[in-house]
Amino acid sequence: MCSSLVQIAAFIAESLQSCGGQVIPPSGYFQKVAEHVRQAGGVFIADEVQVGFGRVGTHFWAFQLQGEDFVPDIVTMGKPIGNGHPMSCVVTTREVAEAFMSSGMEYFNTFGGNPVSCAIGLAVLDVIEKEDLQGNALRVGSYLTELLEKQREKHPLVGDIRGCGLFVGVELVKDRVKLTPATAEAQEIIYNLKEQHILLSADGPHRNVLKFKPPLCFTKEDADLVVEKIDRILTDLEKALGLNLPNTANLENGGSPSLYLSVSSAKH
């Protein structure tokens, strides 16, 4: 980037990719990105709109998963800060703020800093702290992931399960070796859940990753209910498709599930 004739202004990314399919970057990844971007004259912007405010459980901000030595130049946040009220904000370093002020550029926002929104934001922060919602995200998120891992042992359509706290993605595949996206199957699951008053969405380039991003007050009972519904839907769907996991005897003896699918002929 340094050799480019065009100077880099900024690099912006979600601390954990949400719409990209619940992609978790490896530790240290953003440090290297920030190093190259800053050397090229740019700033690193972390988007915490979906994943901030304790959702990942172990930390308040998802970018902290990279390590305590990583500090973005700018952080954008919104959505959960207002708990439904339309509100967002930007946090930056003193260096960036002073450079902006000295540039002569004026920033104006008609509704910026209005007292009602600020009061709502403060109230939400109080609730997160008093009700230990970050701790709840860690506990219930771990429980939810355990339940989903058990579904992976039962259902051939369930591929990778990844996430942190109450930010979890379940990738659906037709084949665990080829990783063929089960896009239509994901949409079928979402539709059936909606019919049972449970709202999920699918993300990722192929729209085959079930996105779990519930309210931070989500309980273990809620997790039980959702996973039970998914279990039933997957069972019916796989039966109709003629999908099954091979080596079930091996599974019953404590073995690991096969990494491929056995597809039997089925009449539709």
Image: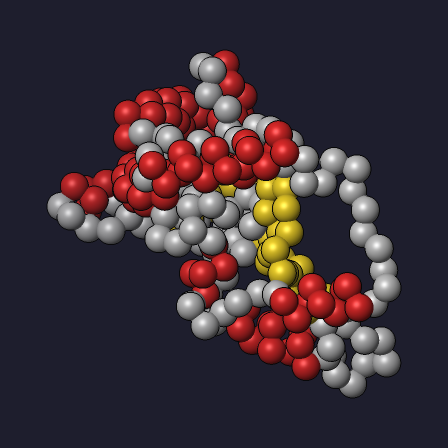
Q: Residue at x 46, y 21 (%)?
A: 198
69, 89: nearer the viewer: 89
Report the residue that reaches farthest toward the left. 253
Q: Quadrant of residue 262?
A: top left
> Is the residue 105 above or below the residue 52 in the image?
below
Residue 175 in picture, x, y percent from top left:
46, 46
Q: Where residue 142 sits: x, y (%)?
A: 30, 44
Picture residue at 60% right of the left edge, 78% below the top:
35
Colour setup of the view: secondary structure
Nearest the viewer among 51 and 157 is: 51
Q: Position of residue 265 (x, y in %)?
A: 45, 31
Furthest-bottom residue in view?
3
Residue 127 versus residue 100 in the image, above or below = above
* Picture coordinates of residue 23, whole percent (x, y): 51, 53
Task: Evaluate whether residue 239 shows in this view.
Answer: no
Left/right of residue 222 with respect to residue 89 in the rendered view: left
Residue 198 can be seen, yes or no: yes
The residue sitting at the front extreme is 115
Name the residue rendered at 40%, 34% in the picture.
Answer: 127
Q: How many marks?
A: 0
**61 is higher (above) or lower (below) than 139:** below
Q: Quadrant of residue 223?
A: top left
- Direction from residue 15 to residue 101 in the image, left or right: right
Judging depth in this view, the residue of 71 and 37 nearest the camera is 71
Side of 26 where 152 appears, left or right: left
